[in-house]
């Protein structure tokens, strides 16, 4: 019977747990929603939203009510042979993310049957008042009775009737137990560092309360005492078989006799014995959705009373009864359905991870107050030190890299250049004020010689080689371009053609474009040369596909400085 009850409970739990994990188990709440905050905590909430207080206020959360059913068992002097039914209800409220309080009511019935023959039942008021004279004394001679499983006991015959076997009984009981308790519940796993939430909640609990009980024994068959003498044989397979035979062939289902109780010495409630009690237990809840969850619990209750099973007398090896000093307790294993109640409230706090806000705000800030960024600019030229390539004197105009502008390329920044455009042929001898001194015959002052061409003034410009299949400039190529940039910068009136080769197919055309584009971008972004000074020329014949040539543009030569990629889908990063 015991194993069957456990199997049924396990099967039911497994089905409900499977249902729980198939459901949505969302959680959390919006910290900006002021309707979730009680009025008494609104000042803190307002400070938090304004950024003057670091901690959000605790939200209003729902109450939980629960109903449960399960298996009940008393641990006492008489073995509990079956797990009996019980039911309960509770109401629970969170006072934080970890701790909550719960008021619980339980109502259950416990039964038990002894498999050992007992002679001194007269000492038990529940049996002695109905079966024998409580003052009756027993003495030798005694006879041995063999109980199931090979357990032996001593049975005496009545005084003066040595040849007559003494009657004996097998104790039994049926106890109706109710209790009401206030429990503190501690949640064990809702604070999680690597997961936002969980569909399963582990908790432990303990509390104090009061228990009332009424215990009866099955001592009479109508008005006649049972004849237990037929149960002294050892022919039964085991204790379970023995008790089954006793219930089916000897006892009826009527527990008609009040068992021994505390009488009028102890408080009564509703006519039943009242005792303070304490309980401890553990449980696990499985979330079905934000309103429902399934819980499995095991609770152990301690009562300072030895009469829950109606028996406090224990026989020794000689058949004499003595008063035991241990107390009875009971266990309640249950499965329950819990419901969250409350409008304009979030679900109970024990289902919410208090780290949700902190982690989400770090990942995607919504409420954090960021200070205005302050980027240092030591020379005050408008380009932050992080990107400034030159500490420029105050008042000097600069390019996007923080380098002083030098329009004529004579090496004297515009802010100090008294001759903003110095002729190229006069730049070979420029003074500190940027004024060129032209070295020529006396007659050139009236008829200046023709200026040299761009090709003559800049000289031959280099070629840039790329690795096959690559668009990246090597360190050697960057150094070569730095040298070319100096020549280009010193000839501000000249344009430069950047020429790439090969165009027999789409791939070659796109590679040629990529190479030319990489060279121009480097000279503009890294060397500070205006893009207007370049002519973008790709896909030409007569050159190496992995080479880009730079040359001075011929007089009157023109072309675009930017060209759209011919085949964008073939571009390489």
Image (cartoon, grey):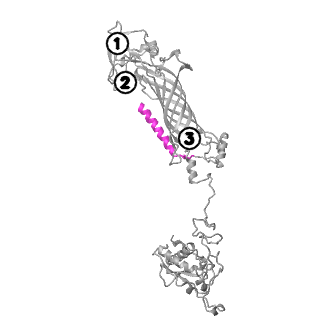
511 displayed left or right of 446:
left
Circle 3 sits on which residue? 97
User: From the image, which quarter does the N terminus lie in?
Assistant: top left
Tell me whether the residue at label 3 lies in contact with that at label 2, contact meaning CB atoms closer than 8 angstroms.
Answer: no
Magenta highlight on residue 452:
no
3 or 2: tag closer to the N-terminus: 3
Q: Main secondary structure of the magenta part?
A: helix
2 or 1: tag closer to the N-terminus: 1
Q: Nearer the viewer, residue 166 or 363?
A: 363
Label 1, residues with CA under 10 Å away: few <14, some 14-19, many ≥20: many
Label 3, residues with CA under 10 Å away: few <14, some 14-19, many ≥20: some
Instruction: Give SS at disc 3.
Output: loop
Whether residue 215 is situated above or below residue 35 in the rendered picture: above
Circle 2 sits on which residue? 242
Instruction: Give SS at disc 2.
Output: helix
Q: Which residues are magenta?
A: 2-27
Mark pair 3, 2: CA separation: 52 Å
Residue 453 at what x, y percent from top left? Answer: 58, 87
Residue 387 at what x, y percent from top left? Answer: 57, 67
Residue 335 at what x, y percent from top left? Answer: 50, 35
Q: Nearer the viewer, residue 437 or 398?
A: 437
**Image-quadrant location for residue 224:** top left
Whether residue 284 is situated above or below residue 490 in the rendered picture: above
Whether residue 338 is situated above or below residue 274 in the rendered picture: below
Q: Nearer the viewer, residue 320 or 571?
A: 571
Circle 1 sits on which residue? 156
Q: Mark number for residue 175?
A: none
Q: Nearer the viewer, mark 3 or mark 2?
A: 3
Q: Residue furthest top?
A: 160
Mark pair 2, 1: CA separation: 22 Å
């Amino acid at each position: 019977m015991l194993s069957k009850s456990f199997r049924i409970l396990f099967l039911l739990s497994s089905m409900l747990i499977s249902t729980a994990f198939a459901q949505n188990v969302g959680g959390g709440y919006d910290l900006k929603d002021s309707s979730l905050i009680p009025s008494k905590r609104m000042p803190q909430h307002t400070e938090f939203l304004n950024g003057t207080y670091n901690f959000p206020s605790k939200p209003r959360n729902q109450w939980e009510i629960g109903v449960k059913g399960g298996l009940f068992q008393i641990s006492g002097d008489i073995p509990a042979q079956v797990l009996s039914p019980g039911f309960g209800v509770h109401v629970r409220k969170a006072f934080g993310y970890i701790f909550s309080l719960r008021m619980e009511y339980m109502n259950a019935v416990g039964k038990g049957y002894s498999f050992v023959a007992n002679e001194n039942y007269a000492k038990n008021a529940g049996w002695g008042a109905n079966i024998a004279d409580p003052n009756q004394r027993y003495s030798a001679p005694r006879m041995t009775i063999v109980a199931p499983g090979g357990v032996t006991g001593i049975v005496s015959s009545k005084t003066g009737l040595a040849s007559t076997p003494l009657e004996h009984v097998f104790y039994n009981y049926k106890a109706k137990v109710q209790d009401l308790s206030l429990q503190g519940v501690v949640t064990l796993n809702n604070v999680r560092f690597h997961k936002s939430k969980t569909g399963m909640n582990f908790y432990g609990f303990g509390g104090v309360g009061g228990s009332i009980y009424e215990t009866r024994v099955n001592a009479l068959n109508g008005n006649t005492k049972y004849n237990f003498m037929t149960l002294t044989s050892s022919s039964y397979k085991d204790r379970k078989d023995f008790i089954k035979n006793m219930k089916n062939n000897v006892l009826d289902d009527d527990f008609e006799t009040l068992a021994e109780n505390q009488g009028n010495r102890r408080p009564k409630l509703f006519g039943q014995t009242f005792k303070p009690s304490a309980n401890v237990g553990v449980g696990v809840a499985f979330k079905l959705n934000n309103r429902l969850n399934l819980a499995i619990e095991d609770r152990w209750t301690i009562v300072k009373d030895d009469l829950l099973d109606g028996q406090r007398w224990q026989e020794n090896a000689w058949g004499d009864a003595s008063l035991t000093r241990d107390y009875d307790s009971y266990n309640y294993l249950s499965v329950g359905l819990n419901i969250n109640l409350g409008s304009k409230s979030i679900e109970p706090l024990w289902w919410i991870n208090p780290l949700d806000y902190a982690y989400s705000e770090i990942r995607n800030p919504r409420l954090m107050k960021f200070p205005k960024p302050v980027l240092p600019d030591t020379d005050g030229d408008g380009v932050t030190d992080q990107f400034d390539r030159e500490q420029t004197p105050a008042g000097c105009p600069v390019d996007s890299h923080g380098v002083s502008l030098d329009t004529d390329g004579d090496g004297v920044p515009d802010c100090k250049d008294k001759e903003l455009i110095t002729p190229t042929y006069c730049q070979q001898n420029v003074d500190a004020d940027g004024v060129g001194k032209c070295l020529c015959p006396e007659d050139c002052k009236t008829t200046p010689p023709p200026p040299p061409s761009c090709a003559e003034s800049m000289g031959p410009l280099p070629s840039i080689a790329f690795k096959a299949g690559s668009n990246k400039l090597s360190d050697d190529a960057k150094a070569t371009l730095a040298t070319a940039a100096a020549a280009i910068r010193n000839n501000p009136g000249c344009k430069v053609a950047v020429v790439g080769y090969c165009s027999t197919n789409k791939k070659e055309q796109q590679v040629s474009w990529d190479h030319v584009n990489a060279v121009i971008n480097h000279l503009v972004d890294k060397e500070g040369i205006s893009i207007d000074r370049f002519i973008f020329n790709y896909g030409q014949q007569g050159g190496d596909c992995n080479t880009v040539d730079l040359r001075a543009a011929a007089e009157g030569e023109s072309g675009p400085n930017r060209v759209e990629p011919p085949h964008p889908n073939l571009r390489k990063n």
